[in-house]
Image: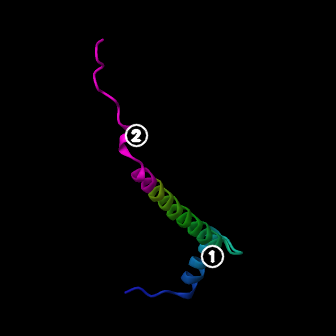
C-alpha cells in the first residue's frame, strides 16, 4: 500500500518543525491547554457552589405579597 521513503519523512518533519516551531512550543501549547481545562473545571465548580447557596435560601423571602388591603 503505502511505503514511507526517508526523503518524505524528512520533509514531513521539516514542515512540522516550521509549523510548531522548536524550543518547547508544543509543550507550551499543551500547558496552555491544561490551564484552560483547569480553569473550566474551576468555573463549573464555582457555579455548582452558587447554585447550592441559592437553593439554601428561603423561597418565602423572594415571594411577593399579593394580599389585598383592607378598606377602613
Determine whether 51 is above or below 17 in the image.
above
The local crowd at label 1, few if under 14, some if 14 to 19, many if 20 or more residues have their Cα within 10 Å, is few
Residue 38: x and y in percent read 55, 66
Of 68 and 30, the residue lying toward us: 68
Tell me which residue sits at (69%, 74%) in the image: 22
The magenta region covers 51-72
The local crowd at label 2, few if under 14, some if 14 to 19, many if 20 or more residues have their Cα within 10 Å, is few
Q: Going by the image, does 22 lie left or right of 71? A: right
In the rendered image, the quadrant that contains the N terminus is bottom left
Outermost residue toward the top in this view:
72
Of 60 and 10, the residue lying toward us: 60
Which residue is identified by label 1?
A: 14
What numbered label is drawn on residue 36? none
Residue 14: x and y in percent read 63, 76
Of 65 and 7, the residue lying toward us: 65
Q: Going by the image, does 69 lie left or right of 33? A: left
Which residue is identified by label 2?
A: 61
Amino acid at each position: 500500500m503505502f511505503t514511507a521513503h526517508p526523503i518524505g519523512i524528512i520533509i514531513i518533519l521539516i514542515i512540522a518543525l516550521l509549523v510548531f516551531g522548536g524550543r518547547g512550543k508544543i509543550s507550551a501549547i499543551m500547558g496552555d491547554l491544561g490551564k484552560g481545562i483547569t480553569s473550566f473545571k474551576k468555573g463549573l465548580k464555582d457555579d455548582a457552589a452558587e447554585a447550592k447557596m441559592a437553593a439554601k435560601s428561603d423561597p418565602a423571602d423572594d415571594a411577593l405579597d399579593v394580599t389585598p388591603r383592607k378598606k377602613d
